[in-house]
Amino acid sequence: MDLISIFRSFQNRLFDVLFSASQGFLYELWNDLMAALLSLAFLIILFVPMERVFRANKQAFFRPAWWLDFSFFLGQYLLWGGIMVYLLSHFSSWLNTWMPYSFREAVASQPWWLQMLEVVFLSDLLIYWGHRLQHRVEFLWRFHKVHHSAEHLDWLAAHREHPLDTVYTMGLINLPAIVLGFPLSTIIGLITFRGIWAIYIHSNVRFPLPFVRVLVGAPELHHWHHDQERDAGNYANISPLMDLLFGTYVCPDHEPKQFGIKEKSPRTYLGHMIEPLLPKNIKKRLRF
């Protein structure tokens, strides 16, 4: 076989490999896109009527920065969500090698409802203090402020997050479940539940049920957390118990005058992704 034939054979094989890889990538991308669109339809059907009936603030469906938040939504569903599950699964596998079997056996011997209460309590305790640190520690705030830069709250605004901020938050929230030995399928179920809950507490809703919000929280509590004041309170995730215990519970009988942050923030998705990674002296020279 001459060199030309060898080269053509290699070229054909390389083409076949690249073609197969591109087909697989396009197939996965198509599946992820369909899943994202179905999730979008589900969230619109679930939350938009709720926001119309129990509206907290008067605003249109396509309010300012809607398309920016939609970019965050697509980013989460098409890229960052899969990476997050991958990181959690590998972290769980790594931690499993360090956890004593006797400890896991003792946890598994408890009633399932007690295990769930332990996970929720420990998870809320961790994320409460982790969340307060996000507002106090400047390095953590530079990523977390992407989420707080939203000047309008609704079901879509919940998706405005920097992926590194999501890794930090999801790591803390799911750490108790991983340590206690919950299977990955259960942890993914918890992630899904907490994801829906996060969308709910950001929704443009205000329920006239004060006795309920003291037990399980409500959008109006989290709305005050998104007040322009950086340390506005209400750091808890699900139940406001931690805020009540540590004196950060806030719930006036009206909505905040303005959401967002006092700092300048990018107006594009790419800007929000890049800006927190840059040193201050470089950020001042760039405009996103």
Image (cartoon, rainbow, N blue to C red):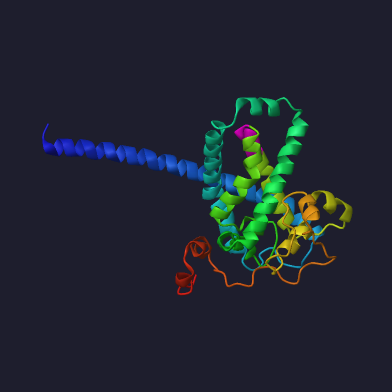
Q: Residue at x 65, y 34 (%)?
A: 180
From this viewpoint, is residue 182 visible?
no
Residue 207 appears left or right of 223: right
Decide if residue 133 is in sight here. yes
| Rendered-image quadrant of the N terminus | top left
Pick the residue in front: 81 or 162. Answer: 162
Percent x, y of residue 86: 52, 41
Q: Quadrant of residue 55?
A: bottom right
Q: Which residues are magenta?
A: 183-189
Rendered residue at 50%/65% (across/down)? 275
How far across and how far down the image is residue 84, in percent?
Answer: 55, 45
Q: Residue at x 23, y 40 (%)?
A: 11
Q: Which residue lies at the image location 63% right of the left edge and 46% below the top edge?
A: 172
Q: What x and y, as percent, mark residue 13?
A: 27, 36
Q: Quadrant of residue 190?
A: top right
**Side of 20 relative to 165 (left or right):** left
* Residue 177 placement: quadrant: top right
134 vs 51, left or right, is: left
